[in-house]
Image (tube, rainbow, N blue to C red):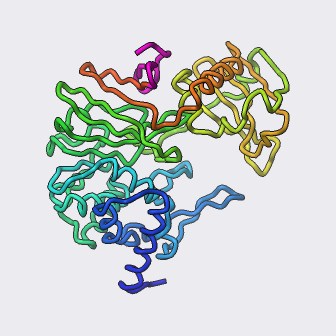
Amino acid sequence: MTVTMDEDRLLREQFVHVIEQNIQLSSAVRAAFLAVPRILFVPQYYARNDQTFKWTLMSAEAANVYRDDALVTQIDARGMPSSSSSQPSLMAEMLEALAIQPGQRVLEIGTGTGYNAALLAHITGDALLVTTVELDPELADKARDALEQVGYGSIQVSISNGLQGYAPRAPYDRIIATGGYPYVPGPWIDQLAIGGKLVMDLLLPLSYGLVALDKQPDRVATGHFLAKTRVGFIQLRDEDMLQPSPRPVRIQTYLSQPLLTEEEVQPDEIDTTVFDDPTFLFYLQLEYPHLEMKYLGTPENAPAFTKYLFDLNTLTGMICPSDQHDPQSVWRVEARGQYNLWEAVKAAYHCWENLKRPVLSEYRMEVDAQARQSILLGSQRWIMREGQCGKIKSS
């Protein structure tokens, strides 16, 4: 369905009103969403069939594009999403955290459709000040075309590895990553100007969190996590990850491990909904950095559809309650492997409860002069090592 410019403008006004139900917009960010037509950046998107789990390419209609939803725009060889137009309210929260001032130089990691780059150009007031980096040449070419259509053709679109930043135009006053990564790449800190700000999604195997860091002298960066818990960014890729392979779970090997416990858990012993709570999973990840959640089977062949919590380094794991589990009913737990993961999870749960269930915005992050990365909560500190967190230490 084709819409007129007036109809599109009306849809954008309604679109901004929907975004404002989730986040308070500054005048600059609000004006950017009103000015930039999302429909030109997302002419097509993929919709997933909830029964078959297959993705179908759809021609975009304005009524579907101007919603507060992420839209998948590319599927890889495995049939998995590899690029998307992010949820607009999430984009807005990151743009607000960036606090861009007119005339500032901005680097975007992960061009995707180019929509966010256009928003950045509108806010900074000069498209020449915006650099955006995309690893996939096909995506970069499509983004250039769309940016040209909306009058932002002078944005620098570079086909390169965004994990290395983009040194030729550094330093930058602001850096934003529109894909997730398990730690802060060093080049981003190096290319950020003193007093500059970086906003990214710290994407860990169990959970994730948007973090805003301010660059201090001597390469130090400090900041805090934002409140939003439902993020869902696709992981940024390097040259070896254009077609990433899923990390295999050797389920038969796991099932052959010693059975450590098999018991029924009463509803008052642990709140089973925490296994779907990103704030608990974030804390659990800090305490046990090698854990990942795996879903084996498919919902249509339940009860074979099972959710496992795995420590892939030791083939240790446990069965978790599914998303459909009634938290008021008894739950059967089974743990196998080298140590009793169920006991470890219970210990982490009780610590989290004693801390009064901290939310993401209570955590802070530091990158010191030696590039050591830490996550802090009150007096507690976890040291990041190659994207993994060390055991808890006193600050």
State which quadrant residue 255 falls in: top right
Residue 72 rendering spot, x and y as whole percentages: 50, 58
Using the image as rendered, state which of residue 151 and residue 212 is in the foreground: 212
Residue 389 belongs to magenta span: yes
Say which quarter of the image contains residue 84. Answer: bottom left
Asked if residue 247 can be seen in this view, the reply is no
Q: What residue is rendered at 45% in x and 63% in y? A: 19
The reply, left or right, for residue 362 in relation to residue 31 is right
Identity of the residue drawn at 49% across and 16% down: 392
Q: Which residues are magenta?
A: 377-395
Does the stretch in magenta take in 9?
no
The structure residue drawn at horizontal position 38% and vertical position 49%, both measured from the top left corner, is: 178
As drawn, is 380 to the left or to the right of 27?
right
- Residue 244 spot, x, y in % from top left: 48, 41
Q: Position of residue 43 (x, y in %)?
A: 43, 71
Vertically, is 380 above or below 331? above
Camera-side residue of 218 and 61: 218
Depth check: give the residue in front, 192 or 93: 93
Position of residue 233 relative to residue 144, above or below, is above
